[in-house]
Amino acid sequence: MRNNKVNLTTKMKSFIRLVKGSRMKLTLSFICIIMCGVTFSQIHNPVKWKTAVEKISDTEFNLIATATIESGWHIYSQKVQEGGPIPTTFFFVKDDNYTLEGSVQEEAGHTIFDTTFEMKVKSFSNKTSFEQLVTVKDANKNIKGSVEFMVCQDTRCLPPTEIDLVFDLTKAKKVTDKKKLVNKKPTKGKNQKGLLSIFFIAFLSGFAALLTPCVFPMIPMTVSFFTKQSKNRSQGIRNAIIYGVSIIVIYVMLGSIVTGVFGADALNALSTNVWFNLAFFFLLIIFAVSFLGAFELTLPSSWGTKVDAQADKGGLIGIFFMALALAIVSFSCTGPIVGTLLVESASKGGIAPIIGMFGFSLAIALPFTLFAIFPGWMNSLPKSGGWLNTVKVVLGFLELALAFKFLSNADLVLQLHLLEREVFLAIWIAIFGVLALYLFGKIQLPHDSPLTHISVGRLSLGLLSLSFTIYMLPGLWGAPLNLISAFPPAQHYSESPYGVGYQKLATQVQASSKGETHTDLPDGAHLMPPHNILAFNDYDKGLAYAKAVNKPILLDFTGHACVNCRKMEQHVWAKDKVLSILKNEVVLISLYVDDKRPLEADEVVESKLRPGKKLRYIGQKWSELQAIKYKTNSQPYYVLMDLNEENLNDPVAYTPDVDEYFNWLKNGVATFK
């Protein structure tokens, strides 16, 4: 491309020298502007999609959508956190002829922490494939769908694009490799790494449950029973192992029931459901209050009586019912942890609930089994006491903190802005601050024993809680808090995106070139943080205001998920000389090409670029305006124009050099004057 520009410029200069002084000079200049415009402005289409179909059986097919991506560009994963870039999303036309099995599977890609979005973002470069398994009734019919995606590179992003996809089942290739056939089956959940994470968390949760007042005292009682009732050591070891396996079987059965009743992906789909999140919020609050000592959650006493009767029969069945009795008796302590684990793991989909319950039960079963095999170890166990209740209370505080994560999810879905980032962090700061005071002995709860001294373990845990509380405090002033970035709402979802101490002059704007201030914002205007630049997001209202104050227009084609748009705003617009022009000498109209808000009914028209398709979103309207009028579709893209909507100078794209961007602005404003 650069060589073409050099050749073009050289030829034009030679041609102009030949006709220097002639009347053709003006015409040649006009031709040069047109040609240069074609050279520098273009519609980018860096992603090409192809479809293919693999036949697994007469009724099972694997739909494959492959994206070939130009070097330097990338598209994003299907799963992106709130506030991140636009994810890749697949849609399939509803048809009774086929059933989707699981969800669309994607490749590993590469994940990095994006400092602009302040989150980990997964993307794909060069070439990647997405696969969807389907079961069909008639293999002679096509399956239609579409994919929506956003493509970016280091210096710009393109607006979200939707491409139609057609999967021709009649051209499906037979899959004969058995290993490949296995791989085509939907995983319906996280990968192996994700399952290992669930197992590890569940195991730690089981260990925490083991240290509660309901479970820990049961260890010596149970071990004593096996050692006394067994005729010899080998029988005692066998019975202890059967007891431990029975505990695992009981909890794994519970996980299997949850998976079977709700389905492998049901709770995953509910994870963004408002009512699901609200229900689980209230459930966790009940669990937390129970752990803090307000009341105890217990199963009906008749259940324990019936199970004890079965346990007295002895034998393998008796041992199994002994394990079941443990689960019932300890429910007041283990129930809240098991409930939390089940919903958290089930929301991941697949066999995660089974893996979660296996990890939890293994942590509980191991001590009972090992101490029964090696009864001498019992002497090393700490004595039961007030520390067991301390563990229970700490778990109560953790349940309370986790509850607000689910309330935050509901608030984000509804966009109520009731639990914004500052409020969420304030609640967590209060919870962990009070926990620190409790661990230091400054606060006591109903079931606590008198505290004569603080143990090293309790002091360490208190210092950890206090440190975490202090760590969160700067978050109120805009700190990113990367350690807990997955829990609080994103920074843009807040009362003050740049921190509580940020003073936004919401009622003062520069309304004229003389710098006069007024208390009312013009119709359709707002102040863009953090620089308080008067901006419009509606083209017509911005144009009307520019005519009223007789100022040139800075048209800013941007995007909510545009990385380099934010870099320009944070590093170039923030400079005093640039900021002065933006505030006082131009009218800024920012048009977001990825704005997903629906257009009003009377604004929904057919696309001029894609005949047969309707413009449904506000962003599509601005994206089409940019493509048709300026022959480009990348962001950021800046245009300085007069009140007749004619360009004052050549538009520019991403311009990180402050002096270059300032000179461009200054030149356009001077031309207007």
Image: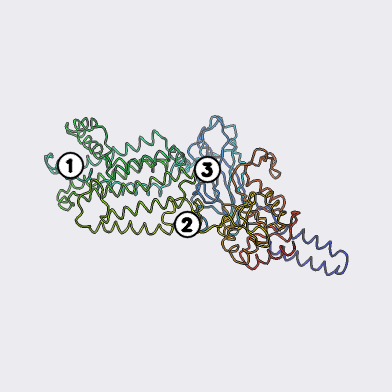
The CA span between labels 1 and 3 is 51 Å
> What crowding class fits label 3: few (fewer than 14 Cα within 10 Å), some (14-19), or many (20 or more)?
many
Q: Which residue is mark 1?
A: 222
Mark found first going from the N terminus, 1 or 3: 3
Residue nearest the observer in this picture, 532 or 204: 532
- For residue 68, side relative to residue 376 (left or right): right
Three-letter code, disc 3: Glu
- For residue 241, side relative to residue 561 (left or right): left
Looking at the picture, how far across and down is residue 483, in whole percent?
41, 56
- For residue 313, side relative to residue 403 (left or right): left
Q: Quadrant of residue 301?
A: top left
Mark found first going from the N terminus, 3 or 2: 3
Q: How is the image coloured?
A: rainbow
Camera sees residue 337: no
Looking at the picture, how far across and down is residue 542, in whole percent?
67, 52
Regarding mark 2 in the picture, which secondary structure is present there?
Answer: loop
Task: Give the vertical position of 266 relative to 546 (above or below).
Answer: above
Rendered image: mark on residue 44: none
Task: Give the vertical position of 504 relative to 598 (above or below).
Answer: below
Three-letter code, disc 1: Thr
Q: Which residue is mark 2?
A: 500
Rendered image: mark on residue 131: 3
Quadrant assignment for the C terminus: bottom right
Regarding mark 3 in the picture, which secondary structure is present there?
Answer: strand
Camera sees residue 521: yes
Task: Give the vertical position of 265 relative to 371 (above or below).
Answer: above
The CA span between labels 3 and 2 is 45 Å
Looking at the picture, how far across and down is residue 143, in whole percent?
58, 36
- Residue at x-position 43% and y-position 45%: 190
